[in-house]
Image: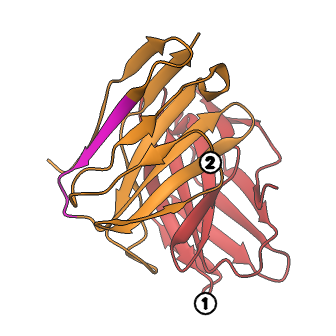
Chain colours: A red, B orange
Amino acid sequence: DQQVKQNSPSLSVQEGRISILNCDYTNSMFDYFLWYKKYPAEGPTFLISISSIKDKNEDGRFTVFLNKSAKHLSLHIVPSQPGDSAVYFCAASVNNNDMRFGAGTRLTVKP
Amino acid sequence: EAQVTQNPRYLITVTGKKLTVTCSQNMNHEYMSWYRQDPGLGLRQIYYSMNVEVTDKGDVPEGYKVSRKEKRNFPLILESPSPNQTSLYFCASSRGRGPDTGELFFGEGSRLTVL
């Protein structure tokens, strides 16, 4: 039973445009949400997080939005750059226990 | 340099031959965990440890064992590997619980093939 779902396996955008990666979850107890980025042959690296008491968190070109009523979060990258091409994982946890990950979305940013 | 180190990075073995994947972190993190990554399933947690001598099962613990005798090390043991344990394994650590401490630091991964 996947409690965190990323329904788009892949996304392709043009350089300079906005990338929007989506994530849905089913467990209303999740209180901490994170996005990780993974390049080939490397481990995932932390990108940005948000706690359930917020609905938006911004870090440079990256913004995460949380809609608790819809159990949905999204990651916006603007402007997108070719170096952003990677697999992005959404993750969620309850009090940082047992972090659950989505299946990932492969983002390709075309020059 | 802060890092999580896994070994081996690549391993091909045969069914039933016991193996251990080591994991070590140099950040004095309390929390460590093991994940496996499979196509279409993302990262699934195998076991985690909140501190020394404290371990607990994740989503997919069957066929695996762990131990946490020291804070820095968290080995993953496959007593009798089977082909369905062919996967990419990641060890991760974090400072602890709660927002702003829960960021996971991952190792580079260990690709295991069981024939």
How far, Cα to Cα, is label 1 from label 2? 26 Å
Looking at the rendered structure, the kind of residue marked 2 is: Arg
Along the line of sight, the residue nearer the viewer: A69 or A84: A69
Residue range highlighted in magenta:
B20-28
Looking at the rendered structure, the kind of residue marked 1 is: Ile
Is residue A16 at least partly visible in the picture? Answer: no
**In the image, residue A84 lies at what x, y percent?**
52, 39
Q: Residues within 10 Å of mark 1 (few under 14, many from 20)?
A: few
The residue pinned by badge 2 equals: B44
Q: In the rendered image, which quarter is residue A75 located in?
A: bottom right
Q: Left or right: A71 with respect to B53?
A: right
Along the line of sight, the residue nearer the viewer: A75 or B73: B73
Q: Are marks 1 and 2 in contact (CB under 8 Å)?
A: no
**In the image, residue B34 lies at what x, y percent?**
47, 48
**In the image, residue B87 lies at what x, y percent?**
58, 27
Please, which chain is the residue tagged with disc 1 on?
Answer: A
The residue pinned by badge 1 equals: A53
Main secondary structure found in the magenta portion:
strand
Q: Left or right: A1 with respect to B23?
A: right
Is residue B77 depicted above or below A99 in this figure?
above
Is residue A43 depicted above or below B29 in this figure?
above
- Which element is circle 1 on? loop
* Foreground: disc 1 or disc 2: 2
Q: In the rendered image, which quarter is residue B100 located in?
A: bottom left
Is residue A6 depicted above or below A10 in this figure?
below
Q: Residue at x 51, y 69 (%)?
A: A49
Q: Are marks 1 and 2 on the same chain?
A: no
